[in-house]
Image (cartoon, helix red, strand yellow):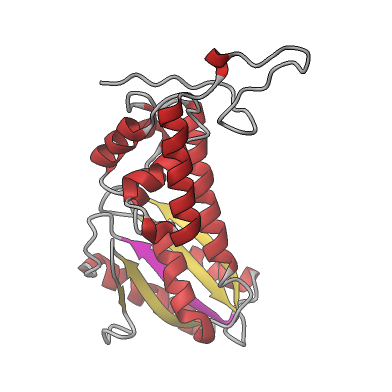
């Protein structure tokens, strides 16, 4: 297995900075086969976008800056073999990433930077916007934030009287198949935010969004608590790996 070494990151990865008074040494140059490969990948990406590259090549692009002096294709393939796909690699917990041979702080930083950018971009498309007119963007955001998590997470989306999303808050994190939720806390927070409506969202790490009896019971409890205080529960979304289930659409609300 190849060994990877991280080094301080230059502004450009095809040449290390050298004093102006000294000629550049050949040993400091990126090997031509790596330089040419990276150039081709960048050109393909710029010309065709992410769809022009398979997962391992897209991951190579992310790894270029973290490991500027070596072929990163073996590490990209190792990460995909370990975590399953590009999205799961980006969202993998830091302790699990750190256990992969060749992954250090620089690699973890690059992966988590891309993940954070994806979350922030998708969130910006839904915050302070009417949910009705941005429903697809809302689903995209929920999938980006939660679909690839390996433990359950429960979020509440708080809306104002115009159904504009005013807050998105993670209420609890649980285990691989359970997350504790307290209806009183959910409704109390709605009053603090002066919210008029709620959308509940949680993920199923198994990938299957089918609601459990506990999911249904918890939703009914929150529905009753919210209704007593004139707060509307619009929906409860369960996010799976590639699809979601809406309680409203399924007749469960």
Name the residue rendered at 42%, 72% in the picture: 139
Name the residue rendered at 28%, 37% in the picture: 77
- From what the image shows, is residue 252 above or below residue 208? below
Name the residue rendered at 25%, 65% in the picture: 214
Please state if 107 lies on the left or on the right of 179 as rendered.
right
Q: What percent of the width, then of the height, locates residue 181?
A: 39, 60
- From what the image shows, is residue 179 above or below residue 225? above
Please state if 222 lies on the left or on the right of 162 as rendered.
left
Q: What percent of the width, then of the height, locates residue 5?
A: 44, 19
The C terminus sits in image quarter: bottom left
Q: Nearer the viewer, residue 180 or 85?
A: 85
The N terminus sits in image quarter: top left
Tell me which segment is drawn in magenta: 196-203
Residue 211 within the segment the image draws in magenta: no
Name the residue rendered at 61%, 33% in the picture: 12
Regarding residue 150, the answer to whether it shows in the image is no
Q: What percent of the width, then of the height, locates residue 79?
A: 31, 37
Residue 198 within the segment the image draws in magenta: yes
Q: What percent of the width, then of the height, locates residue 28?
A: 56, 17
Q: Nearer the viewer, residue 190 or 95?
A: 95
Instruction: Say how many tags the image has.
Output: 0
């Amino acid at each position: 297995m190849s060994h990877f070494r991280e080094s301080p990151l230059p502004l450009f990865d095809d040449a290390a900075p050298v004093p102006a008074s000294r000629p550049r040494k050949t040993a400091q140059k990126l090997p031509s086969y790596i330089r040419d490969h990276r150039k081709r990948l960048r050109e393909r990406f710029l010309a065709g976008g992410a769809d022009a590259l398979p997962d391992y090549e897209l991951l190579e692009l992310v790894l270029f800056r973290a490991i500027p002096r070596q072929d990163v294709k073996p590490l990209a393939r190792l990460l995909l073999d370990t975590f399953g796909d590009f999205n799961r690699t980006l969202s993998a917990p830091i302790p699990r990433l750190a256990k992969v041979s060749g992954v250090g702080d620089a690699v973890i930083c690059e992966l988590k930077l891309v993940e954070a950018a994806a979350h922030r971009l998708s969130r910006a498309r839904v915050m302070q916007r009417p949910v009705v007119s941005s429903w697809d963007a809302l689903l995209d955001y929920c999938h980006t934030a939660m679909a690839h998590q390996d433990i359950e997470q429960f979020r509440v989306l708080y809306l104002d009287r115009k159904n504009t999303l005013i807050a998105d808050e993670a209420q609890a994190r649980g285990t691989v198949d359970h997350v504790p939720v307290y209806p009183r806390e959910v409704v109390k927070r709605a009053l603090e935010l002066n919210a008029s409506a709620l959308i509940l969202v949680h993920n199923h790490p198994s990938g299957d969004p089918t609601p459990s009896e506990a999911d249904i019971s918890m939703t009914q409890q929150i529905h009753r608590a919210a209704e007593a205080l004139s707060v509307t529960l619009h929906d409860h979304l369960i996010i799976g790996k590639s699809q979601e289930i809406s309680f409203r659409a399924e007749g469960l609300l």
